[in-house]
Amino acid sequence: MSARKRWMPVLIAAVMLLSLAGCAPAQPAWAQHPLRIAGGGATGVYYDYGEHLAAVLRRDRGADVQVIETNGSVDNLRLIGEGRAQLGFAQSDAVADAVAGSGDFDAPLPIRTAARLYDEYVHVVVRADSGIRSIADLAGRTISLGGTGSGVSVVARRVLEASSVAADEVHDAGLGLGASIAALTDSRVDAFFWVGGLPTPGIEKLAGQLPIRLLSIGAEVVERADAAHDGVYRSAEFPVGTYGSRASTVAMTVPNYLVTSADVPDALVHDVLAELFASRGEIAHDVPAAAMLDRRLAIFTDPVALHPGAREYYRDARR
């Protein structure tokens, strides 16, 4: 056998290794440590969005990323404040409480924002054949105001308060989204609250199996809730066709933020935002709420300060 033939397999293997090395993602210093993203329930938009962002960071940055299943905003903020997660999703009202050390938080947390992502809709879901027609009709009923540690619970109680329904007038099952869906299906609850992007996967699946209806949250209720809680709530409408609806439903919205801690490295936040915006269309293919990400609006996270790494990213993006 000639020397050329003997060395040919070695040369081919070397070329293949060099090629693979060239395709490997460049791993920044922050990616040498595990990155944890505080998501929400597995049937919600937070978790879905987090999983898709994690996949992009694994692919493009070589990062070790895990999405943590939680009950929602309050849980996420606590995990970040304790350093057990570096990023997470949270409603702006819960974020404001965390920074101020009010509401569900006994002391201020060092929370910073990375981006305003999209507006979440407050859902009040009943069976289509239910006699419940308004928020006031919830008095005396068994409903789920959301799981312990969720932003849903925060908003649900504020909607009841603004509707002149005392929290102790309802029997709260205290369930997360997946359990709420199962309980409504089995008629163990009469209604449940949820706060999430459109469409929320779990509710979309429910609507395909069981006819449901969304209760309206009137403009006057939204105004009272907004006036009492830092001006974070707005009126909107669920579009016709949402979850199979034949008419629009008046709703309340609250902004949703990607949040982090003041202790997280600037480079990590900068790079995550670069990937988030670069992959917006890719993620939106499976998570429609991602299409609402807008660099011009992402910086508006008052009263909570942007992380320095986020400020650097937005400055760089303008150049």
Image (tube, rainbow, N blue to C red):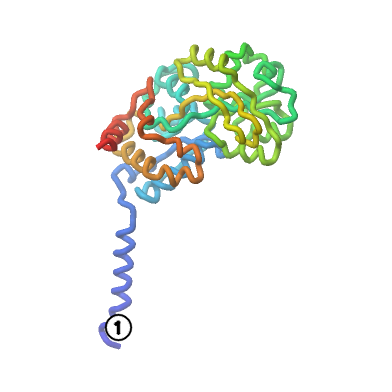
- Residue 87 is drawn in which quadrant? top left
Dot 1 amino acid type: Lys
Residue occupied by mark 1: 5
- Residue 190 is drawn in which quadrant? top right
Quarter of the figure that contains the C terminus: top left
Quarter of the figure that contains the N terminus: bottom left
The answer to whether residue 85 shows anywhere in this view is no
Q: Is residue 63 left or right of residue 249?
A: left
Q: Residue at x 68, y 19 (%)?
A: 138
Q: Residue furthest bottom?
A: 1
Q: Is residue 215 above or below residue 318?
A: above
Q: Is residue 101 above or below residue 67?
A: above
Q: Is residue 213 left or right of residue 56?
A: right
Q: Residues within 10 Å of mark 1 (few under 14, many from 20)?
A: few
Q: Position of residue 148 (x, y in %)?
A: 56, 26
Q: Position of residue 100 (x, y in %)?
A: 41, 17
Q: Report the number of numbered marks.
A: 1
Q: Position of residue 32 (x, y in %)?
A: 33, 46
Q: Position of residue 196 (x, y in %)?
A: 54, 31
Secondary structure, mark 1, is: helix
* Near-viewer residue (12 or 275): 275
Q: Residue at x 64, y 24 (%)?
A: 215
* Near-viewer residue (294 or 189): 294
